[in-house]
């Protein structure tokens, strides 16, 4: 094994990247506020979590963001986009990808920038300055690779950074394969060094080199290391130059390799081996006044231990750091004034889930803040910018005059649906007190203006919804109806329901029948998925859009008048439905050609139900009202169903959702996707003419909350 160290000038010591079995852990000033933030990069999926340092041991942990790389084998931190703040470089030998990520904003993640690679197996990335023509204040990239189909599979590629854009500067053969790479310094204010543990034909060694010539050049080597050895760097002797501690995870011994400087050149000094008394899992360098200290992780269920070490005597175990929320201690990272413990839920946990901060005060660590880390569960809002880009690029209708009713077939299938163009306009929303069946939550009547949109001619059927709910079946259909792989990738990234334990049609029929019993969250995510498949932006209607389309220019209780005896001609309800829903489109449409607006199944809207919402408008004309949800219950459904009486099928009727709609669900927690006791709730699509922003799309597709 070989530690490669390559040098340029640096004003201060660089953040050290620690590799653990699950993640790469490091620090960096990612938002440019002068404070060290904490970086976690998952090896498995490349998702990045950052704790932005607010001072006083308080960290603002952002939701995970994409690095653009999975099966991560190398991470580095450096000034990649701006000389005043750090960025992240990530690579993977297995998937042959290299990317850089700007993490300046805690709330608005930037898309990762993929860098084309001409080699095979880029297993390390090191962000450092490379002198020579075209050099800038930003960090360049040194990228070793070890899977090249040549006699020598090992290569080193250098990329020049020009304002955050990277071009290949050189590519050369390498005598060794690198691992556990880092950028370090061996002297305060001295040369920046790039370190990588490497293996060659002669065995495992530690190599030191320089990049001052623009190419990696060896300076010195430390041989006879174990193949799995790791290292940390610190000032343990209290000398002018730093030291390298070499250790092998699972061994109780450490080796201090002193580094000496003579005539401006570094060289290895005396090496000493010391016993820690028990096998060590991880070592981290920590502040200790004039000398560095170590924080060691030993057994799986033990505390982290602060280890005093003067480079001459046996290391002394000192303070133990027990995390108040830590389940099973996994790793630790240090800042100048703190140590942060990271834990998993179990000894076999695949994700780091909790953190505990210890603040350094007068040489001792004091308990600080603690809590849960952001989940690494799939989060499909990262798909939204790409979906919106496709929607905008494919938009042919520039104004309401361009809108026409259309039928569309979902790409990769033979399933079609129809959308009716609805002109924007103003109407009187709600019902009068004298209307038969009137309820207090339908008043006061108020004037509303809605913008142009398309609305589904029919309720969404099982033919369409099951493509979303059962992805395996949908993917089989793609084999018969080929479609763009980018569309497939985008729609497959949208979260889908868990497969229900029972037939959610409850035996009432599927082909041509309305899909039912999905939660409002499931309905929203279906719209998200359909948007990704089709390149049109779909969502649920607001209450105002639904009622405007249902009334179709009328002011009566129903779109066909006030006579409830005529309901049987326009909709399915308790008296004529034979105790089940019916195929869509079998009754008369309303004046705008929409079927089943009265009865068959109730239809979800976006709005949180509030019986006093209509009274809050102050008597003014409200434009595109939407009562955004802040809690899981109640949401508003409209139109009535096969199980309801005619008064619930009126244009103004509002029915709130309740927890009783999933009362018999045996799961704990109860499903976020399916309603075990709501055999009469379904979906009607809306597509607004005006395409919202990405941020607005996310709000539409979550509608405030997605879990109880």
Image (tube, rainbow, N blue to C red):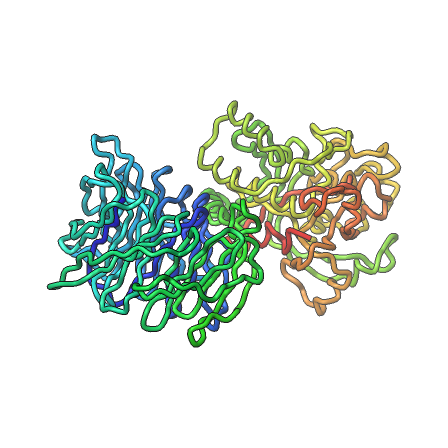
Q: Say which residue appears at 76% left-offset and 44% top-offset.
A: 602
Q: Say which residue appears at 45% left-offset and 33% top-offset.
A: 485
**Could you say which is closer to the camera, residue 607 or residue 92?**
92
**Could you say which is closer to the camera, residue 502 or residue 579?**
502
**Could you say which is closer to the camera, residue 352 or residue 560?**
352
Q: Say which residue appears at 40% left-offset and 46% top-offset.
A: 68
Q: Say which residue appears at 82% left-offset and 59% top-offset.
A: 432
* Residue 281 appears in the rendering: no
Asked whether, in this view, residue 61 is left or right of residue 683, the answer is left
**Name of the residue lying farthest toward the left:** 263
- The x and y percentages for residue 445 are 77, 61
* Residue 559 appears in the rendering: yes
Number of marks:
0
In the depicted structure, whether residue 586 falls above or below residue 183: above
- Give the image quarter of residue 290: bottom left
**Name of the residue lying farthest toward the bottom:** 362
**Could you say which is closer to the camera, residue 226 or residue 49?**
226
In the depicted structure, whether residue 493 falls above or below residue 101: above
- The x and y percentages for residue 377 are 55, 47
- The x and y percentages for residue 540 are 64, 47
Which image quarter holds the N terminus? Answer: top left
- Give the image quarter of residue 592: top right
């Amino acid at each position: 094994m070989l530690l490669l160290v390559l040098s340029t000038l640096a004003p201060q010591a660089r953040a050290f990247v620690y590799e653990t079995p699950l993640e790469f852990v490091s620090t960096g000033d990612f938002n440019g506020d002068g404070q060290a933030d904490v970086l976690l990069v998952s090896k498995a999926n490349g998702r990045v979590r950052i704790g932005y340092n607010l001072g006083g041991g308080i960290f603002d942990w952002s939701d995970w963001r994409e690095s653009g790389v999975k099966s991560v084998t190398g991470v580095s931190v450096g000034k990649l986009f701006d000389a005043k703040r750090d960025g992240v470089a990530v690579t993977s030998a297995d998937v042959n990808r290299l990317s850089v990520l700007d993490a300046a904003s805690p709330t608005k993640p930037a898309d990762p920038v993929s860098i084309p690679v001409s080699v095979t197996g880029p297993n390390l990335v090191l962000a450092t300055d490379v002198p020579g023509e075209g050099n800038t204040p930003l960090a360049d990239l040194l990228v070793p690779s070890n899977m090249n189909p040549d006699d020598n599979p090992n290569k080193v590629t250098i990329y020049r950074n020009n304002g955050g854009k990277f071009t290949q500067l050189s590519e050369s053969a390498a005598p060794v394969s690198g691992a556990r790479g880092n950028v370090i310094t061996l002297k305060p204010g001295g040369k920046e060094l790039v370190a990588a543990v490497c293996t060659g034909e002669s065995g495992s060694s530690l190599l030191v080199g320089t990049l001052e010539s623009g190419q990696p050049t060896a300076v010195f080597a430390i041989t006879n290391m174990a193949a799995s050895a790791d290292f940390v760097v610190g000032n343990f002797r209290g000398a002018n130059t730093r030291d390298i501690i070499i250790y092998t995870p699972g061994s109780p011994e450490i080796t201090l390799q002193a580094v000496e400087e003579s005539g401006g050149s570094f060289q290895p000094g005396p090496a000493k081996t010391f016993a820690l008394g028990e096998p060590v899992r991880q070592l981290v360098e920590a502040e200790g006044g004039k000398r560095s200290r170590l924080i060691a992780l030993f057994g799986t269920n033990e505390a982290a231990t602060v280890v005093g070490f003067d480079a001459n005597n046996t290391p002394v175990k000192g303070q133990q750091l027990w995390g108040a929320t830590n389940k099973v201690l996994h790793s630790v990272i240090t800042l100048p004034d703190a140590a942060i413990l990271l834990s998993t839920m179990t000894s076999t946990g695949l994700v780091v889930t909790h953190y505990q901060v210890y603040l350094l005060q007068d040489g001792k660590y004091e308990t600080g803040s603690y809590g849960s880390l952001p989940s690494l569960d799939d989060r499909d809002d990262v798909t939204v910018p790409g979906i919106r880009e496709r929607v905008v690029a494919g938009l042919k209708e520039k104004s309401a005059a361009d809108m026409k009713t259309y039928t569309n077939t979902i790409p990769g299938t033979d399933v079609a649906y129809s959308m009716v163009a609805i002109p924007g306009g103003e109407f009187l929303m709600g019902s009068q007190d004298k209307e038969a069946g009137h309820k207090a939550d339908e008043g006061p009547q108020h004037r509303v203006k809605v913008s142009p949109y398309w609305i589904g001619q029919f309720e969404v059927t099982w033919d369409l919804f099951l493509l979303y709910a059962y992805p395996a079946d949908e993917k089989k259909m793609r084999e018969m109806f080929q479609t763009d792989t980018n569309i497939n990738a985008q729609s497959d990234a949208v979260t889908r329901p868990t497969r229900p334990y029972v037939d959610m049609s409850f035996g009432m029929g599927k082909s041509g029948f309305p899909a039912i019993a999905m939660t409002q969250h499931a309905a929203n995510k279906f719209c998200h998925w359909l948007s990704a498949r089709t390149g049109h932006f779909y969502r649920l209607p607001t209450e105002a859009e639904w009622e405007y389309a249902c009334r179709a220019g009328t002011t009566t209780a129903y779109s066909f008048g006030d006579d409830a005896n005529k309901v049987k001609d326009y909709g399915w309800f308790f008296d004529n439905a034979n105790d089940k829903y019916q195929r869509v489109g079998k009754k008369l449409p309303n004046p705008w050609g929409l079927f089943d607006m009265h009865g068959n199944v109730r239809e979800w809207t976006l709005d949180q139900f509030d019986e006093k919402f209509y009274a809050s408008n102050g008597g003014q004309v409200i434009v595109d009202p939407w009562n955004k949800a802040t809690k899981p219950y109640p949401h508003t459904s409209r139109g009535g169903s096969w199980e309801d009486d005619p008064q619930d099928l009126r244009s103004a009727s509002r029915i709130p959702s309740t927890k009783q709609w999933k009362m018999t669900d045996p799961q704990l927690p109860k499903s976020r996707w399916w309603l075990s006791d709501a055999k009469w709730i379904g979906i009607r699509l809306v597509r607004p003419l005006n395409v919202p922003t990405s941020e607005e799309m996310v709000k539409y597709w979550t509608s405030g909350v997605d879990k109880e």
